[in-house]
Amino acid sequence: MKILITGGAGFVGSHLADRLHADGHDITVIDNLSTGRYSNVAHLEGKEQFRLIIDTVLNVRLMEELIRDSDRVFHMASAVGVRLIMERPVQTIETIFRGTDVVLGFCARYRKRVLIPSTSEVYGKSTQVPFAEDNDIIKGSTSKHRWAYACAKELDEFLALAHWKESRLPVVVVRLFNTVGPRQTGQYGMVVPNFVRSAVKNEPLIVHGDGSQTRCFGHVADIVGGLVKLLETPECFGQVINIGNEYEISIRGLAEKAIEMTGSKSEIHYIPYDEAYGEGFEDMQRRVPSLEKARRLIGYEPTRTLEDIINDVAAEFRA
Ligand SMILES: NC(=O)c1ccc[n+]([C@@H]2O[C@H](COP(=O)([O-])OP(=O)(O)OC[C@H]3O[C@@H](n4cnc5c(N)ncnc54)[C@H](O)[C@@H]3O)[C@@H](O)[C@H]2O)c1
């Protein structure tokens, strides 16, 4: 099949490109290399059945041509990462909402299967864990900019479901929980690569807040397997589905584990959120996925542990 991956030089997108290329598909990646890196797909370039286009998903004429020529679309391009969202608020909203609007519009016109990644951030400040797809969601005020990411992604979800409702566009919306593994950069505030890199270098690990906040981390290889299955399962069309890992750990616990597993001499330093992200930053205490729906629809079962993740990320930094 011909598969278009927007944002395919990014972290998740490049693993998806590897997997689908290895499965024998014809892959086109479009990426503007804003947070993605050429090195993530350099090993694919020059191979048969792989094409890299460096451009933006906001190039409407190009996107029409690419989508018309594809059998499947994985729309992984997005502004990503809390730091980027706090620092470039306009770009965040425009990339997320306008980009998805372009993709969904052409997928609807040419009747193409499309996967739209959303995020666990949409659950906002909800404390009703585990987060199930039909739970109510609670957001902070619009003056707190971190919520712009969640709201833009939520609007993407509404638009995708609207296309399904109005014209039965075969679209799957996936709420990704923290996805980690090799190639993820720590540059935009991602906690696992930052901790592991600091631990490997024996530098201090910087924890925001008191570190009691918890997260669940999914290995990118598990996540990618789930994404591929979801788009090949028609029962998933018009659905919003969580994908992640249910194992929960505090950020302090994660820091300790990274230090222990890498045999590091690093210390843990705690800094207030305000110092890391500016005044008025709000974070969620817990974020745990309910994977019941993914299990029921595609038999989703994560197979890699947090230890696997830390080992894989540490091996990459050492290399
Ligand atoms: N990694 C996670 O933990 C996580 C969690 C929740 C949701 N997601 C979602 O998964 C998707 C992929 O995220 P990721 O972690 O791989 O991040 P990433 O930053 O590595 O990937 C995003 C890619 O999109 C590209 N991009 C950005 N704007 C573009 C534009 N206008 N045109 C073309 N390309 C553009 C970037 O260069 C990058 O390669 C995103 O939609 C993100 O919101 C990821």
Image (cartoon, helix red, strand yellow):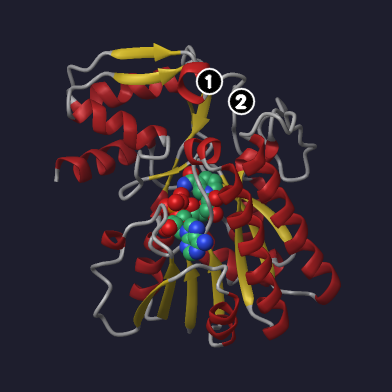
Q: Residue at x 35, y 38 (%)?
A: 186
Instruction: Report whether residue 21 is seen.
Output: yes
> What kind of element bears circle 2?
loop
Q: Position of residue 216 (x, y in %)?
A: 50, 34
**Badges 2 and 1: C-beta atoms under 8 Å apart?**
yes
Answer with left or right where residue 135 lies relative to residue 16: right
- The residue labelled by disc 2 is 284
Residue 163 vs residue 278: left or right? Answer: right
Residue at 40% x, 32% y is: 191
Q: Looking at the picture, how far across and down is residue 153, in whole percent?
A: 66, 50
Q: Amino acid at mark 2?
A: Met
Which residue is tagged 1? Answer: 213
Classify residue 107 by image quadrant. bottom right
Quarter of the rendering containing residue 8: bottom left
Residue 250 visible in image: no
Nearer to me, 125 or 7: 7
Distance between the alpha carbons at the discs numbered 2 and 1: 7 Å
The one nearer the camera, 292 or 284, is 284
Question: The disc labelled 1 sits on which kind of residue?
Answer: Gln
Rendered image quadrant of residue 29? bottom left
Q: Determine the secondary structure under disc 1.
A: loop
Dot 1 alpha-carbon crowd within 10 angstroms: few under 14, some 14 to 19, many 20 or more: some
